[in-house]
Image (cartoon, grey):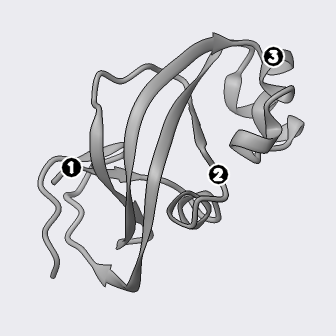
Amino acid sequence: MRGLIIKQPFASMIVRGEKKWEIRRTRTNVRGEVVILSQGYALGKARLTDVLGPFTVEELLKFRDYHKVDEDFLRSYSGGKKLYAWVFDEPEEFEKKVKVNIPRGAQVWVKDVKSD
């Protein structure tokens, strides 16, 4: 299964269902179930159903309940460019996080998630 690398605390928020949108600088064609990875662990999984945007920071501020990101972070992350919302549903947090082998250089996706 494909894994998506997400920084904390956002990774945990997604697998708990507290955060529905992951904000990114680019689109993705990936859809379906993905493992949510952070700090070398698989925390859970969720279904990536859509990509919305592009959005300006001002437009995204109206949807803070979905993405949970503050204005300062959005402005810094965007670098003045538009952003995309990767939409997740069907979150599932694993009972116990699982140590995984993330290949050197992987920044966004891990093609085949394997536990150590």
Disc marking residue 59:
3
Query: In the image, 64: left or right of 25?
Result: right
Q: Amino acid at mark 3?
A: Glu
Q: Is residue 91 above or below residue 57?
A: below
| Residue underneath mark 2 | 19
Q: Report, in whole angstroms, how far the alpha carbon at label 3 lies from the one at label 2.
A: 17 Å
Image location (x, y in percent) of residue 16? 57, 67
Disc 1 or 2, which lies upstream in sequence?
Answer: 1
Image location (x, y in percent) of residue 49? 40, 33
Callout 1: 10 Å neighbours few (<14), some, many (20+)? some
Residue at point 61%, 57% (across, down):
10
| Residue underneath mark 1 | 2
Circle 2: element type: loop
Q: Amino acid at mark 2?
A: Lys
Work out whether residue 8 or residue 17 is closer to the camera in this orientation and state it: 17
Disc 1 or 3, which lies upstream in sequence?
Answer: 1
Q: Quadrant of residue 62?
A: top right
Circle 3: element type: helix
Q: Report, in whole angstroms, how far the alpha carbon at label 1 lies from the one at label 2.
A: 20 Å
Q: Quadrant of the N terminus?
A: bottom left
Q: Report, in whole angstroms, how far the alpha carbon at label 1 lies from the one at label 3.
A: 30 Å
Disc 3 or 2, which lies upstream in sequence?
Answer: 2
Q: Quadrant of the C terminus?
A: bottom left
Residue at point 87%, 38% (across, down):
72
Q: Amino acid at mark 1?
A: Arg
